[in-house]
Image: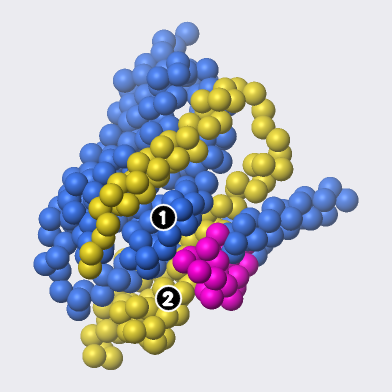
Amino acid sequence: MSMDHSVVWIVIVSLAVGSFLIRFSFLGFIGDRPMPEWVLRHLRYTPVAVLPGLVAPLVLWPAATAGMPDPARLAAALVTLSVGYFSRNVLAAILSGAATLYALLFLLG
Amino acid sequence: MTSSNPKRYFLRGAQDALPFVLVIVPFALLFGVVATEAGLNVAEVMGFSVLVIAGAAQFTAVQLMTENAPTIIVILTALAVNLRMAMYSASLTPFLGKAPVWKRALVAYLMVDQAYALSQIKYELEPELTVPERFAYYIGTVVPLAPLWYAASYIGAVAGTQIPASFALDFALPITFLAMVAPALRTIAHVAAAATSVVLALLLTWMPYGSGLLVAAIGAMIVGAQIEGVMARRART
């Protein structure tokens, strides 16, 4: 696949500057003044607001199977989510998800 | 009286972060592989991993670029993924806000999920730590992680094109993200936000170039915050 390399660098530099400013934000500019409650309350949900929406189409309509739902990938996603939820252990969730995926891909051919 | 001992806390931080090496290395390898297969060269892969140093946002950007999304959408969506770090920054501020500005800048550059989580817990459990000790602990937690993040990205980028499709590496990204999200589903508000995100993202796939994901994320944040507000009011009455 071809990529416009000047565009790639625009993305890299913008993300580098933007990410740094997000990370530095309160620490750098607010110092030890308190912050409005409502801002914190929204920020608290950013990971669970962005990542599930990003993953959902990749789980349901994987590009590797030309967008057709795939039993092995669906099962791997469910196992990862359950193990992660009950064990609260990221690594255990990744490993059991990967094991499920490979086992089913092997069994289902 | 106990004297300030930053070195001890630096070593403690490094030790506490060691298990995360097992997450960081495969994740970075995968980024190198996926980005290379998307058409990025080694310098660009390293540009991402060294300058942006945020796995989820890097993957998001590469994914959207392969979908030929407009550059501004790529940047905004990847930055939205990193917005959680504004929360990290806010919650570290009471503990590190008095450190010199160059130290705060270094903390900001190295702000990754694992360093934040470990440090936040440490600061709350040991409120008597001095600011230099807190800084030393934080830097300690990234010492085993950041260099391996760079190195594994490089190896992934170089080895990238030689990994066969039967490894189903396309699904390493969903698995990694699900594994990160699942333990974060601590309250009804978190579960509702995640569910909103999934439903809206799926309903809005017709919107051009992943902009549906931005709308879904904003909706999900509002739902989470609203439910938290309702639960808090109920708990008070």
Count neighbours of disc 1 (C-alpha within 10 A) and say few if under 14, some if 14 to 19, many if 20 or more: some
Q: In the displayed structure, does residue B5 sit left or right of residue B125?
A: left
How far apart, in angstroms, are the residues tagged by discs 1 and 2? Answer: 25 Å
| Helix, strand or loop status at disc 2 | helix
Magenta-drawn segment: B193-214
Question: Label 1 is placed on what type of residue?
Answer: Thr
Whether labels 1 and 2 share one chain? no
Mark 2 belongs to chain: A
Q: Residue at point 34% right, 78% down?
A: A63
Residue denoted by label 1: B71
Where residue B64 sits, quadrant-wise, is: bottom left
Using the image, determine if residue B4 lies above or below residue A59.
above
Q: Which mark is residue A103?
A: none
Residue denoted by label 2: A59
Which chain is represented by yellow in the image?
Answer: A
Q: Position of residue B163 (x, y in %)?
A: 15, 69
